[in-house]
Structures are given as C-alpha cells and as structure tokens.
C-alpha cells in the first residue's frame, strides 16, 4: 500500500540535500536545479498517491512505524509517521507549493554564486517541514520544528556577508528559541500528565477529561507560546519582517506557505487539548486579533514591497489564530491552505518585480509596470483580490468562515476583525497601485532595462494564480450551495465543529465584509491612482499615527530598551565583576599563592646533607609524638 511508503516523502528531499550539498561546487547550475526540483516533485507525486489512497480508505488514520528511537524507563518514543486527513493535506501544500518555488528559484537565483548551497538548504527545509507534519508524536514533531528553525536561520542569512542580513537571521533564531522553550516545556508536562508523547495515547485520555483542568490549561498555554514564536504572534512577531533579508523564494516558502503555519498546524493537531482549556482559547483569540490589527496598521505605511507582504503575513496569521481561539479549527486550517496559495503567489510576484528592477524594493521608485510586466501584474492582481477577500476568489471563503464564527463568539471581536479586513484590502491595493499604476518613478536608464521574468519564474506564478482563484472550492459553505468538502475531510481529526450562523445572518456578514473591502479598494484607487499620491520619505511631513505605523510602533526599540540593554548591562557586570574580579581573582589567587609559597619551600632544597639528616630526624620524632598522643 502506498501509505506504507510515506517515509519516502521526507527521505527523498533529504537525499537531494546531500547530493546538492556535496556537489554544490562541482555540479552545473542546471543539474543542481534539476536535482533540487525533481526530488520535491517525486515527493509531491507520492503525496498525491497517499492522499488518493487515504480518500478511498475507510480507516482515515494510519501510523507507519519505522523503528524504536528512544527508550528510557517508561518513556518510549518510536520514529513513526501519522498519515491522516490533516497530515495528508499538509503534505500536498509543502511539496506542491515547494516544488513551484524550487522551479521559480532556478530563474531567480541563477546568477547567484551560492546557487548549489541555496538549493541544498531548500531541500533540507522541506525535509524538516515534512518531518514536522508527519510525526506521530510530539518529539518527532519537535525535531522537525527545530529543523525548520535551523533552515530558516541558514536561508534568512544566506547572504551573510551583509551584516544586517546576518543580524536578521540571528534575530529570527533567538526569538524562535523563546517560543521553542515553551513548546518543549509543554511536551514535558504532556508526558508527566499522560505518560506518553504519542498522539494515539494522549488524545483518547484527553477525550475523557473535563474542561477547565489546570494542568491541561498550562499545557495549552505552553504549546501556544511555542506557536507564537514560530507563527509570529505578539509579542514574538518582530523577527518575521526582518526575515525578508533572505532571497524572495525563501520568503515565499518559509514565511508564507509552510514554516509560519507550523504553529497553526500544531494547535489544530492538538485541538482536543485546547478544547479542554477555554480560558487559553480566549487568550489565543485576543492575541490573534491584536496581532492581525497591529500588523495591518503597520503595513499601511511601509514602502518596501516585501515588508508590506511580511506584515500582511503576520496579520493573516493573526486571523488564523483568531479562528483557532473561537474553536473554528476548520476555518483556520482552510485559511492556511488558501493563504499558502495567494501569499506564495504575492511573494513570488514581488520577487519578479524586484528581479525586473535589478533588486529595487522601494515602491516609491516603482510605478507604471503594468505594461512592462503583464504576467506579473495579472497574477499579482489575482493574489491581491484573493487576500482582500472578494468572491469567488479563495481568500473570500476562508476569511468569511473565520469571521462568521467570530461573530457568534463575540460581536465586538467581529467588528474589529472586519475593520482588519478593510485595512488588508486597502494596504494590498495600495501596494498594487504604487507598483503597477501611474508613471515609472525610477531612473530612465533603469526603465529601459525592465523586462518580464523568464518562464521558469512566470509559470509558477500562473499556477499559483489559478489556485488562488479557485482554491476556495474545497470549502464552499452550504449557504452558497456547497457542502464544505474540507470540513468533512478533516472530521476524523477535528471532532469539534464550531457552530455556524443561520443563512440569513451569514448572507449579511458576507455582504458587510465585501462592502468594506470594496470601499477600501475605492479609497486606495482614488488616493494612489487618481491623485497619484506617493508616500513621503520625510518623517517630519507624516502625521503622528503615520509615523508610529511607519516605525512599526517602535516594537524593536522597546524590546531593545527593556530587554537587550538590561541584559547587556547584566552581562557586563558579570563579566567585569563576577568573572574577572571574583572568579578570575580566586583562580589567579590560588596560582599566585602556590607560586609564592613554592618560592619559600624551594629554599629548603639547600643541598646540605647535614640539614637533610636533621629534617629526617625531626620528622621521625614528629611521627612518634603524633602516635603517642593519639593513643
């Protein structure tokens, strides 16, 4: 049975990493690109076979055991993979979108001298991401979790000779470690509570427990902290915008389609535990909503095209967490899928623009590119409409499903979330208009060299554009004549299904959302097309709110003042006082005392035989005296 061959899915990209890693300096770029892309395509083909076999199988869950990995006392951890509806969908997203990004990278990175190293890193990332979603226990998941963190560090800092890029990679690594510590502590408490880290043993026990248990709440909180780090939620979100330092395909693969959704996947996988902790769910909803709004406001004033998309990613992840917090696991995961399509598309379109403009990323120096980059423009328009949430594009269905469940949970939260959707439409069309409308604002010399990207880059754009347009078909709600295939598909994994509003209410909610989006688009059109407004570079000319947004609410500066500088001061104190004066003082003092005492003792070695006889007799007398007194 093909499901039993699931171990090949992560193994083949690992082989690609080894081959390209060893041959990075000897293989031709064509061969490296072929190997790197082929191994992902093979994994994708196997994943399709697994998905089809699972769909035809009555038993929707299979655990494929490979070997016993760790056995210590009562702790038994096998290396085994879980193939079920949730992991099967993730396999298709990771390998399918990953394959398109590999193809795109052949054209985008062709002139880079680190071409072979780049593809080996991409293959390694795919391996760890597949390990993360396939693990049948929290330890295997954690190995993949840490692995994608490592690959993120390597890929963000790929151009490490640039000190700011290297600093961005370190920032991502350190901030992810904060969340990872929470995840690891959560796993420790899981083992203490359930006596196992295996999903198949934990979840049946959890199903018999009552909501509100303190230990379960602590476990859910720690797992959520882990998810906050990996999926860039407040307050651990500042690493993701800085991660745009990596090559654009990295942004598309890691920070749009796969790695940053690992936190959502982990919570969806652990949905039984989170349902037992309603207070933690409420916290998740609040943090997700706050993240969505804060990131959207910051995106309103950014001028770097990749930074706009980065904050858009943070905001969309916030909506996914909002859905998880109100119990809409299906809706949140639906948005993971559609977001993978349109955000990967948008990042790759941004890369196509950057490639055409010779690495220019500032939208103030763009404009008028619609006719010069027709394929990029059309595909980016589709991605922008999808993320804005206009029907019948994919983002409309997933976003409105989350908003509908939020409405039933809390009307105030729904109103704030709709405002966030309004902001999303505005800043995304602002980006589109600044990039493609009006006249070109760069130099005449640069304008003459603008050209559409090669087919290796535009074909993946077209495929992702089609998916962004029609991807919502898997989750059409009953109110629109569908049966929400995705919800039925995930039912063996996600037992709890959030309540949906009645049809009349759902129509009204959809209408409000669509009208808000259309108003936002109209405002953006008037300001950036009709009035040809271009963001001002002078900070003094911006309003106070615009400056706060442009400077990202000074989160980095606040963290620098409250965390980094005090830690640096403590480090300096321990170095200068504790380390150099106390520790080194004791060590050096012992050495000095030994040296000085030896100077006195060496005088006893006089070479006078009579003195040696005298000391020997004195020693004998001392021993006899000691023996006598001790009786």
Image (cartoon, rainbow, N blue to C red):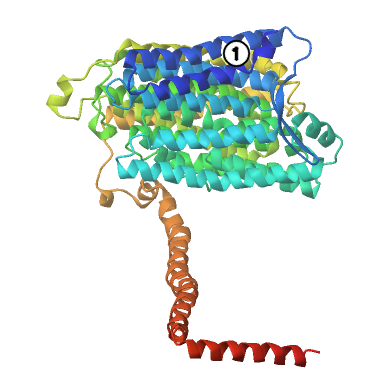
Left or right: where 91 falls relative to 124: right
- Where, by quadrant of the figure, is residue 534 drawn? top left
Left or right: where 312 falls relative to 369: right
Q: Position of residue 122 (x, y in %)?
A: 45, 25
Q: Compared with residue 54, is residue 340 higher up or lower down, i.e. above or below? A: below
Q: Compared with residue 368, is residue 587 higher up or lower down, i.e. above or below? A: below
Q: What number of labels is visible?
A: 1
**Quarter of the image where the C terminus is located:** bottom right
Q: Which residue is mark 1?
A: 47
Residue at the image position 61 percent from the left and 14 percent from the top = 474
Depth order, front residue of 277/253: 253
Q: Position of residue 416 (x, y in %)?
A: 56, 40
Mark 1 residue element: helix
Task: Say if residue 145 shows up in the picture.
Answer: yes
Depth order, front residue of 511/240: 240
- Where, by quadrant of the figure, is residue 427 drawn? top left
Residue at the image position 40 percent from the left and 36 percent from the top = 156
Q: Compared with residue 603, is residue 455 higher up or lower down, i.e. above or below? A: above
Residue at the image position 56 percent from the left and 37 percent from the top = 146
**Quarter of the image where the N terminus is located:** top right
Task: Say if residue 279 shows up in the picture.
Answer: no
Q: Position of residue 85 (x, y in %)?
A: 69, 18
């Amino acid at each position: 049975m093909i499901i039993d061959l699931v171990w090949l899915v992560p193994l083949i990209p690992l082989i690609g990493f080894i081959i390209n890693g060893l041959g990075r300096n000897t293989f031709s770029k064509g061969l490296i690109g072929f190997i790197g892309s082929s191994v992902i395509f093979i994994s994708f083909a196997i994943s399709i076979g697994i998905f089809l076999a699972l769909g035809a199988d009555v038993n929707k869950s299979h655990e494929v055991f490979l070997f016993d990995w760790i056995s210590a006392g009562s702790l038994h951890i096998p290396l085994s993979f879980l193939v079920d509806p949730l992991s099967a969908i993730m396999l298709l997203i990771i390998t399918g979108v990953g394959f398109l990004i590999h193809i795109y990278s052949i054209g985008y990175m062709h002139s880079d001298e680190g071409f072979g190293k780049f593809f080996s890193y991409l293959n390694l990332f795919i391996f760890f991401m597949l390990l993360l979603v396939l693990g049948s226990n929290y330890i295997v998941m954690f190995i993949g979790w840490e692995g994608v963190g490592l690959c993120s560090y390597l890929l963000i800092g790929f151009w490490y000779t640039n000190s700011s890029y290297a600093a961005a990679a370190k920032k991502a690594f350190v901030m992810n470690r904060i969340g990872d510590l929470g995840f690891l502590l959560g796993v420790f408490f899981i083992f203490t509570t359930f006596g196992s880290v295996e999903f198949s043993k934990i979840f049946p026990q959890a199903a018999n427990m009552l909501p509100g248990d303190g230990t379960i709440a602590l476990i859910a909180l720690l797992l959520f902290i882990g998810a906050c780090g990996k999926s860039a939620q407040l307050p651990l979100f500042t690493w993701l915008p800085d991660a745009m330092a990596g090559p654009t395909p990295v942004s598309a693969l890691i920070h749009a389609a796969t790695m940053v959704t690992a936190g959502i996947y982990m919570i969806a996988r652990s949905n039984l535990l989170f349902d037992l902790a309603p207070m933690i769910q409420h916290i998740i909803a609040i943090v997700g909503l706050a993240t969505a709004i804060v990131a959207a406001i910051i995106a309103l004033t950014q001028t770097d095209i990749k930074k706009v998309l980065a904050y858009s990613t943070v905001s969309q992840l916030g909506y996914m967490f909002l859905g998880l917090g109100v119990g809409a696991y299906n809706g949140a995961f639906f948005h993971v899928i559609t977001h993978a399509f349109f955000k990967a598309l948008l990042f790759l379109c941004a890369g196509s623009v950057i490639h055409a403009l010779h690495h220019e990323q500032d939208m103030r120096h763009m404009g008028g590119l619609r006719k010069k980059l027709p394929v990029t423009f059309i595909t980016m328009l589709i991605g922008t409409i999808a993320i804005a949430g206009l029907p019948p594009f994919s983002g409309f269905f997933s976003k409105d499903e989350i908003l509908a469940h939020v409405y039933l949970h809390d009307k105030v939260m729904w109103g704030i979330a709709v405002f966030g959707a309004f902001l999303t439409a505005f800043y995304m069309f602002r980006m589109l208009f600044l990039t493609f409308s009006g006249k070109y604002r760069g130099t005449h010399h640069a304008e003459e060299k603008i050209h559409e990207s090669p087919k290796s880059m535009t074909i993946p754009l077209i495929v992702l554009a089609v998916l962004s347009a029609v991807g919502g078909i898997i989750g059409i709600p009953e109110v629109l004549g569908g049966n929400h295939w995705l919800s039925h598909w995930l039912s063996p994994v996600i037992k709890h299904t959030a309540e949906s509003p009645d049809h009349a209410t759902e129509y009204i909610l959809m209408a409000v959302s669509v009208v808000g989006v259309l108003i936002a688009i109209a405002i953006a059109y008037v300001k950036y097309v009709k009035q040809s407004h271009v963001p001002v570079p002078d900070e003094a000319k911006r309003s106070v709110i615009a400056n706060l947004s442009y400077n990202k609410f000074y989160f980095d500066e606040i963290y620098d003042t409250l965390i980094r500088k005090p830690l640096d001061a403590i480090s300096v104190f321990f170095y200068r006082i504790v380390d150099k004066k106390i520790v080194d003082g004791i060590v050096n003092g012992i050495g000095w005392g030994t040296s000085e005492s030896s100077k006195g003792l060496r005088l006893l070695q006089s070479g006078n035989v009579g003195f040696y006889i005298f000391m020997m007799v004195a020693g004998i007398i001392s021993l006899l005296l000691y023996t006598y007194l001790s009786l």
